[in-house]
Image (cartoon, rainbow, N blue to C red):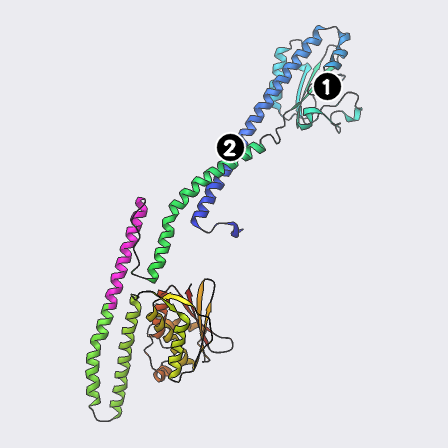
Amino acid sequence: MRRWIPRSLSGQTLAVLVLTLLVSQLIAITIYWKDRHEAVVSTEAHDFAERVVGMADLLHQLPDEWREDIVRESDGRTFHVTLDPAPDAAGRDLDEDLSGTIAAFLARELAEFPPDRVLVRFTDVPYIPRGTPADSRPGKPAAPVTGRDQESQVFLHISLRLDDARWLNFVGGMPAGQGLWLMPASGYILSVALGVAAVAMWLVFRVTAPLTAFAHAADRLGRDIQTEPLPETGPTEVAQASQAFNAMQERLRRLLENRTQILAALSHDLKTPVTLLKLRVELMQESEDRTRMLHAIGDMEAMIASVLEFTKATLLNEPLCNVDLTALLGSICDDMADTGAAVELEPADTISYVCRRIGLKRALTNLIDNAVRYGGNARVRLVRRRFAVEIEIDDDGPGIPEDRLEDIFLPFYRLDASRSEDVGGAGLGLSIAQTIIEGHGGRVRVENRPEGGLRVRISLPA
């Protein structure tokens, strides 16, 4: 059921409008048809009663010996009349109100027939032709009928008792109405639905278009803080929302620039006292304390350099250019292999990609270097998908506990502090890589391989 429900706001709004319209139109047409059908049946019944009055007046004025001949000749396809010893107007009445109205009309028009000699019933028993066996009279299975009676579901039975105790029975079929309104009503509902749907579609998409623009703008803002602001046009509410979004973007841009400038200034200013401190320690005599101090100063220099690199990565102000991604990965792997690292790049087709070349190279270098440091080796694979370009980096290391896979991207996070002292690093490499990749609209994920080792999966939008 859920798969038939539109997921977009415009689709859901349009579906609600059209469905509400269809239901309201169907209810209105049903009520109209019911009232119309009742009016038609009432009119037909009164016309039929007027014919009965005329027939009864005629028989009353003619000699009694002519009655059977007149009745026989008057019997037709839509106006059935018989002269019988018992009344046909018997049994359950389907419309007592209308029957009472018809009976009152006959009592007024036929003074010679008092109310106790007039019977009126609306039943579902059709006309039984003369000569039909007694077991097929009213209340028994009816014989086939012809003419309009074939389409009727309700039959008007009027019985008048004559002076000789015989009954003058009249039977006529009332309009059933089945099928009379289905085709025109269906066409009317369909035409109205199409017309309203066309107008509603235009209105709905006009109203929801700004939401789509906001979604695209928010996506661009997440990748590039310097993206173009939204146009502050359209209806008042849309213009106000665009102004608020642009103001938020400007505040975020200033906040990031201020933070970056502060970090860069602190890192730069710290380099001078750290350098002076290192020079003074190097002038000290050889001792265990001197070695430890030099080691601590080296860690401080590495952290400062990492912070400077992290602030540069968050700026994302490098211009975009078309890069041969296969060649870029090849140069990274070759440079690391020249240093003795166990790095291997699987052969791949040439893939051109628009990116910030220096930033993306820094991110890929950090991820491959991390695999070599902690996994002992790195196997790199580049694959083009339908809507993305994927880069996978595998190693044969010990892997990472499942509950700590996401933590490795936190700034200054160290999975194993004791092991990190041996391999170095300030804990910002993966954070820098994630920032750069997400700045390209991509995503980086880490997972343990079933056969052992770690896999870093980088997905960049194509």
Crowdedness near tag 1: few (<14), some (14–19) or many (≥20) residues, C-alpha within 10 Å:
many
Q: Is residue 291 left or right of residue 405?
A: left
Is residue 410 shown to the viewer in this render? no
Q: Which residue is mark 2?
A: 28
Quadrant location, the C terminus: bottom left
Q: Nearer the viewer, mark 1 or mark 2?
A: 2
Q: Is residue 198 above or below residue 295?
A: above
Secondary structure beneath dot 1 equals loop
Q: Residue at x 34, y 83 (%)?
A: 421
The image quarter in which residue 371 lies: bottom left
Q: Does the segment drawn in magenta span residue 252?
A: yes
View extreme (bottom): residue? 286
Q: Is residue 247 above or below residue 364?
A: above
Could you give the CA–CA distance between mark 1 and mark 2, rounded to whole angstroms? 41 Å
Viewer-proximal residue, 350 or 433? Answer: 350
Q: Residues within 10 Å of mark 2 (few under 14, many from 20)?
A: few
**In the image, is residue 163 above or below residue 184?**
above
Q: Position of residue 314 (x, y in %)?
A: 30, 67
Amino acid type, residue under disc 1 in the picture: Pro
Q: Is residue 330 visible?
A: yes
Residue at figure coordinates x 38%, y 45% from the top left:
207
Look at the image and say whether residue 266 sits in the magenta stretch.
no
Q: Which mark is residue 87?
A: 1
Range covered by the magenta-colored residues: 233-260
Q: Which quadrant of the view contains residue 298?
A: bottom left
Q: Is residue 50 left or right of residue 459?
A: right
Q: Position of residue 210 (x, y in %)?
A: 36, 49
Report the number of discs: 2
Residue drawn 43% across and 68% down?
351
The kind of residue tagged 2 is Ala
x then y, percent, for residue 422: 36, 85
